[in-house]
Image (tube, helix red, strand yellow):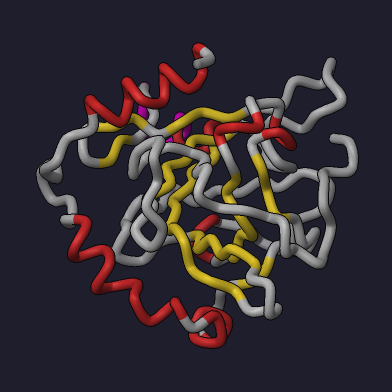
Amino acid sequence: MTAGILLLKAIAALASADPGPGEPTLDEVRAATERFRDVSVALAEGYLRDPMDLCDTAAMMGRPPELGAMGIHFFRPDLLGLSELPGARVNGTGIHTDFLRPAILIYEPQADGSLALVAVENLVFAESWKAAGHDAPPSFHGVVYDTMSDDPSTPIDEAHSFEPHHDRHVWLYRDNPNGVFAPFNPAVTCAHHRGNGAHQGH
């Protein structure tokens, strides 16, 4: 078992079963997002499919392949603070952390071409979060958001085309052996993805 997997399992074990002050329960988040199982509802409510049409996997971000995948991201530009569609590297000013209205929905491509909702996510850009007066990344249910940034010295894009940011995945719609708050899920596959299969450089 790799050190990365051990760390993820340790984080999962430490995850609080109870929400912090003012935070919704996982059941409340599920009730608020259940309608997005139908991707047409997500599109109608302003979510946009990743313009690069990537199905993100751990290997694509320099992590052990056995950690699994994320999937295809659909995002709300307004909640991320994006003024226009992303270019070569996505940036924004949003500091939205309300999981009752997640900024990102994640879908797994199915063999029949449909999409299955597997997780919800919130993401804040590190620079904007710090500018808002925060000295530490946000947290949810006692678990600090993951921090991701690209290392320009490697051929892999560790931040999947985003500027440095903090994010938290919540695997409400697909059981995750790594834990409900882990970034990747070995029970998710990109095998049926018909779009881009990998990041194109940085």
**Which residue is painted at 46% across and 61% down in the image?**
118
Q: Position of residue 12 (x, y in %)?
A: 30, 31
Left or right of 29, for residue 134? right
Q: Is residue 111 above or below residue 140?
A: below
Q: Nearer the viewer, residue 162 or 195?
A: 195
State which region is magenta.
130-135
Q: Position of residue 85 (x, y in %)?
A: 74, 63
User: Quick check: is 131 in the magenta stretch?
Assistant: yes
For residue 7, which quarter of the picture? top left
In this rendering, the count of numbered labels is 0
Q: Is residue 112 above or below residue 126?
A: below
Left or right of 192, for residue 155? right
For residue 136, which quarter of the picture? top left
For residue 39, which quarter of the picture? bottom right
Q: Position of residue 158 (x, y in %)?
A: 70, 30
Q: Nearer the viewer, residue 172 or 66?
A: 66
Q: Position of residue 166 (x, y in %)?
A: 49, 35
User: Quick check: is 157 in the magenta stretch?
Assistant: no
Q: Is residue 34 above or below residue 165?
A: below
The secondary structure that dominates the magenta segment is loop
Q: Nearer the viewer, residue 168 or 66?
A: 66
Left or right of 122, for residue 192? right
Looking at the image, the residue that sits furthest to the top is 3
| Quadrant in the picture for the C terminus | top right
**Which residue is painted at 44% across and 58% down in the image?**
119
**Which residue is painted at 84% across and 57% down in the image?**
196
**Which residue is painted at 24% across and 27% down in the image?**
13
